[in-house]
Image (spheres, grey):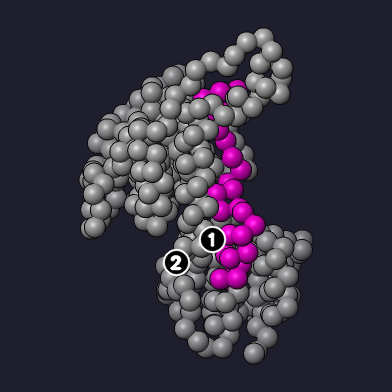
Amino acid sequence: METIGVLMTNPMSSYLEGELEKRFKLFKLWRYPSMADFLRENANSVKAVVGDTKIGADAQLIDSLPRLEMVASYSVGLDKIDLRKCEQKGIRVTNTPDVLTDDVADLAVGLMLAVLRRLCVCDGFVRSGSWKKGDFRLTTKFSGKSVGIVGLGRIGSAIAKRAQAFGCKISYFSRSEKPCTDYKYYSNIMDLATNCEVLVVACALTKETHHIINREVINALGPKGILINIGRGRHIDEPELVSALMEGRLGGAGLDVFEKEPDVPEELFGLENIVVLPHVGSDSLETGQAMADLVIQNLEAYSLKKPLLTPVI
């Protein structure tokens, strides 16, 4: 196998890093003082880029690597990759679909339960010794709730299947109605938000879905509604979300992603009706390794001029 130069944009998996080092000439961008320093020394040595949800391959990076032929994303999302630029230059792109679906769907259900049953607040109640002074207040059940899903793709469908097992009524909004499903379809997200108690964001981030959850949608969900986001932070107009929670116009939220990660609005920290997580939707040992293996297999297939396993372009 030809030893090709692979640029890893930031630390993402020690296992992936080690396996890449065994197979390719690995460049670690974060080890260089600046992008300019890296490019000055190595621009002509890189044929593949491995990125993730933090740093992918934007137009500037792509244009700076004259021999770039492939971008492999350690993620299912593609919003950190300039796909149009890749298409124009004939650069192949892969991602890691399917292997992370279960983890993200599991976490979505966990967030629903945690918000409605106030699990994090309950934990603090016990740890602080407050239980000795009296019982915790009553919370709200999850079973039987009406759950609306924004985006019924792989992850959205897996969330629906899990919620249905709790006796939840499922509805969804998507670009088009999905065949072979009995879930109620809404062609308008406002109608979905108005007719569900829990709204889950599970769609891909595109120009069309940027801030798809705005003030109007939040108001339609209402003061008893719960918003769950396991998609991307930029799906939600974050200042509008914060104000709705502070003013009581939204009942609660479970958030694994934020607009400007790792920065999280400090106003959220004092609220008991939310659960905030550090973008860990797919961060289990098992899934992390499966994602890394898929990245490696795609790179090896590219190196051997074989069909890519999960091509996007």
Q: In which quarter of the image is the C terminus?
A: bottom left
Q: Quadrant of residue 241?
A: top left
Q: What residue lies at 50% left-to-right and 67% top-to-bottom?
A: 95
Image x and y of residue 14, in percent:
72, 63
Give the amino acid type for the residue marked by disc 2 in the picture: Leu
Q: Can residue 33 be seen in this view?
A: yes
Label 2 element class? helix
**Magenta-tinted stretch:** 268-295
Compared to residue 241, the image places residue 2 above or below, namely below
Identify the residue under disc 2: 83
Could you say which is closer to the camera, residue 265 or residue 149? 149
Counting from the top left corner in percent of width and height, residue 213 is at: 38, 38
Q: Does the magenta stretch include residue 293?
A: yes
Which image quarter: residue 9?
A: bottom right
Q: Viewed as shown, does residue 71 lie left or right of 87?
A: right
**Observer able to see residue 206:** no
Q: State the separation of the CA atoms marked 2 and 1.
A: 15 Å
Tag 1 residue: 75
Pointer 2 with pointer 1, Cβ within 8 A: no
Which residue sits at x=29%, y=46%? 173
